[in-house]
Image: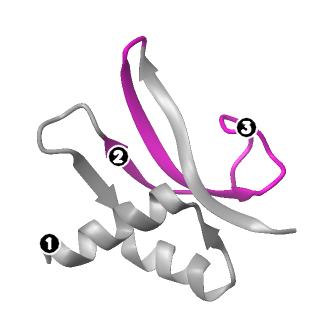
Amino acid sequence: MAVKIRLQRFGAHKNPQYRIVACDSKSPRDGRFLEVLGTYNPVANPAIVNVNEEATAKWLNNGAQPTQTVKNILKSIKSTK
């Protein structure tokens, strides 16, 4: 099973919010997931990001591949610390 770290959309119409989740690469965007790793709210100014860094590191060390968007979000978190 190939694991991806990607965004899962939730929230209201025209007010998107996202969960950062670890899931099987073949599952749909809003389908079943293995673990919630954090949240991302792009509508807020500045964007609000909450990430469980321990769980994210665990999945990355076990071979999970982040999508390009999640990779950019994780880079922005590291650069602000």
Relative to 9, 79 lies left or right: left
Residue 18 lies in magenta, yes or no?
yes
Query: Of residues 32 and 63, which is closer to you in this image?
Result: 63
At label 3, counting other C-alpha atoms closer than 10 Å, the crowd grade (few under 14, some 14-19, many 20 or more) is few
Q: Earlier in the sequence, mark 2 or mark 3?
A: 3
Which residue was labeled with disc 2?
40
Q: Which quadrant would the C terminus be assigned to in this image? A: bottom left
Residue 68 locus on image (x, y percent): 52, 61
Question: Gap between marks 2 and 3, in whole Å?
Answer: 18 Å
Instruction: Provide the residue span drawn in magenta.
Output: 13-41
Which residue was labeled with disc 3?
31
From what the image shows, is residue 39 above or below residue 4?
above
Q: Which quadrant would the N terminus be assigned to in this image? A: bottom right
Question: Gap between marks 2 and 1, in whole Å?
Answer: 15 Å
Instruction: Give the mark toward the camera: 2 or 1.
Output: 1
Residue 22 lies in magenta, yes or no?
yes
Residue 42 locus on image (x, y percent): 29, 38
Which three-letter amino acid code belongs to the residue tagged 2?
Answer: Tyr
Residue 51 locus on image (x, y percent): 35, 62
Which residue was labeled with disc 1?
80
Find the residue positioned furthest to the bottom. 61
How many numbered circles does the render carry? 3
At label 2, counting other C-alpha atoms closer than 10 Å, the crowd grade (few under 14, some 14-19, many 20 or more) is many
* Residue at the spot 42% in from the left edge and 11% down from the top edge: 13
* Residue at the spot 25% in from the left edge and 31% down from the top edge: 43
Relative to 54, 2 lies left or right: right
